[in-house]
Image: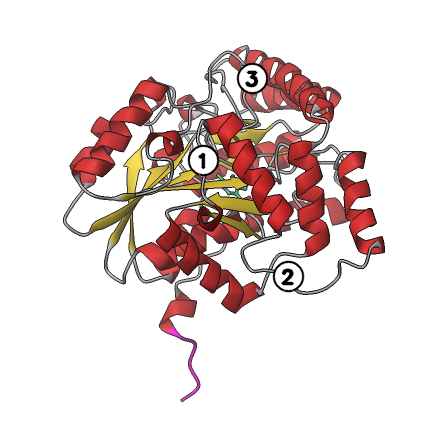
């Protein structure tokens, strides 16, 4: 009998793409929409990075390569890890991946069996849930609380650990809240993982996107990714390279090897010219990144001050990433209804907090990867639309 597999039935995708379809329909009808929904930088990829890729193509680097990644690039990742996180991983701990999204699937597939439990942040990046269910494992959401400014807390995680728990996923700076968890809290979480013998997947894709009011700390330094920590990073956000599909993982050697074999099975390797671009991104001039971060910081301040000036809305100042996660619960409507109202009445696309888990209800995610002009216009329209709710 022709039938879709059970695994395929568990694929959920990313809920935000539903809203994107609706936005596209409105735009096709001629409505002008301000896009604050998707986490895609409005800056082009820095020219030095695209030049490195062009050079690679011109040099004929257009063939299969090692599934681990190019030797020069792996070496640069090792040195960058030393500079940013205080340890140098061995060569067999580093894996170059086609983006950070797929690395989540690799890790969940390699570290959890069907029926086992994986702890995920709630609200959190939706891919975690879909990847876990796809593998037949069970996502167990742990709450990030408004009263803790959405920072991770060991005491919110520990009660949810059972003898089926295998993996703990953490994310700081965080999507959708922009929260940065403090070093002491991350050390407590690491101790928890040791006590219960869990793997920790630390999604650090926003590590370079911190605004200086709070330090970034990586849990990966606590075991140098030798035993239980899998550090995942990506080039999409800080280097404005979302379309390039490039990431890197540092993991215990036996985990890195399994993830590499999964990559080899599904993608063979990452394109050489994309890796050359990544090499330039981490070893070249960091001025373009500093300039983008200065602009994001100005936008963050504009947005968060503007939101807090709207009666009924309150918003923490996010320490990193490019998202704000305001509380809109005083309007007495679901976050989905609020987001719909903002789209219809204000012409502003933002995402319902419930897209990121049950704890996201009562909030919306606003991505400030858009010009200050757009952010100011959006704030005016949101303020007007809120008066009529
Ligand atoms: C927390 C988090 N992890 C991973 C990703 C995936 O990034 P990419 O696949 O573009 O590297 C994203 C993208 O939004 C994210 O927010």
Q: Nearer the viewer, mark 2 or mark 3?
A: 2
Instruction: Return the residue found at the far right.
Output: 58
Residue 50's place in the image compared with 103, above or below, is above
Per the image, label 3 sits on a secondary structure element best described as loop
Per the image, label 1 sits on a secondary structure element best described as helix
Q: Nearer the viewer, mark 1 or mark 3?
A: 3
Which label was assigned to residue 353? 1
| Picture quadrant of residue 231 | top left
Coordinates of residue 318 in the picture (x, y in percent): 49, 20
Rounded to the nearest angstrom, the CA distance separating label 2 from label 3 is: 37 Å
Rounded to the nearest angstrom, the CA distance separating label 2 from label 1 is: 41 Å
| Picture quadrant of residue 227 | top left
**Magenta stretch: residue 192 in it?**
no
Query: Who comes first in sequence, dot 1 or dot 3?
Result: 3
In this image, 72 relative to 152: left or right? Answer: right
Coordinates of residue 63 in the picture (x, y in percent): 71, 64
Q: Residue at x 79, y 35 (%)?
A: 48
**Range shown magenta:** 1-5
Residue 212's place in the image compared with 340, above or below, is above
Label 2 Cα crowd, 10 Å radius (few <14 / some 14-19 / many 20+): some
Instruction: Return the residue found at the far bottom.
Output: 1
Quadrant, the N terminus? bottom left
Q: Nearer the viewer, residue 363 or 119?
A: 119
In this image, 343 relative to 206: left or right? Answer: right
| Residue 22 can be seen in this image | no
Query: Who comes first in sequence, dot 2 or dot 3?
Result: 2
Coordinates of residue 321 in the picture (x, y in percent): 54, 28
Residue ID for mark 3: 211
Q: Residue at x 71, y 38 (%)?
A: 280
Residue ID for mark 2: 65
Rounded to the nearest angstrom, the CA distance separating label 1 from label 3 is: 23 Å
């Amino acid at each position: 009998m022709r039938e879709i597999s059970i695994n395929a039935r568990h694929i959920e995708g990313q809920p935000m793409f539903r809203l994107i379809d609706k936005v596209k329909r409105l735009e096709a009808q001629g409505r002008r929409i301000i896009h604050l929904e998707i986490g895609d930088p409005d800056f082009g990829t820095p020219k030095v990075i695209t030049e490195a890729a062009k050079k690679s193509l011109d040099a004929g680097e257009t063939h299969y390569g090692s599934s681990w990644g190019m030797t020069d690039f792996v070496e640069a990742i090792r040195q960058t890890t030393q500079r940013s996180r205080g340890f140098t991983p061995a060569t067999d701990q580093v894996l170059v991946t086609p983006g950070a999204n797929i690395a989540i699937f690799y890790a969940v597939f390699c570290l959890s069996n069907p029926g086992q439990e994986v702890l995920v942040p709630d609200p959190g990046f939706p891919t975690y849930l879909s990847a876990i269910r796809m593998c037949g494992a069970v996502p167990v959401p742990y709450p990030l609380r408004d009263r803790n400014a959405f920072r991770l807390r060991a005491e919110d995680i520990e009660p949810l650990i059972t003898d089926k728990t295998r993996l703990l996923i953490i994310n700081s700076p965080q999507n959708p809240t922009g929260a940065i968890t403090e070093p002491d809290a991350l050390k407590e979480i690491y101790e928890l993982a040791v006590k219960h013998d869990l793997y920790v997947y630390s999604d650090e894709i926003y590590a370079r996107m911190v605004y200086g009011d709070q330090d970034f700390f990586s849990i990966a330094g606590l075991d140098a990714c030798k035993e239980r920590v899998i550090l995942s990073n990506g080039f999409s956000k800080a280097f404005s390279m979302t379309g390039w599909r490039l990431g890197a993982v540092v993991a215990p050697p036996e985990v890195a090897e399994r993830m590499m074999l999964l990559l080899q099975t599904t993608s063979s390797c990452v394109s050489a010219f994309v890796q050359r671009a990544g090499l330039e991104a981490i070893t070249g001039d960091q001025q373009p990144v500093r300039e983008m971060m200065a602009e994001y910081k100005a936008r963050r301040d504009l947005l968060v001050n503007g939101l807090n000036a709207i009666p009924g809305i309150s918003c923490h100042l996010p320490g990193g990433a490019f998202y704000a996660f305001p509380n809109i619960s005083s309007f007495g409507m679901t976050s989905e209804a609020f987001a719909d109202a903002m789209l219809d009445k204000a012409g502003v696309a933002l995402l319902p907090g419930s897209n990121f888990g049950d704890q996201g209800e009562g909030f919306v995610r606003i991505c400030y990867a858009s010009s200050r002009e757009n952010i100011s216009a959006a704030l005016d329209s949101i303020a007007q639309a809120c008066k009529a709710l």
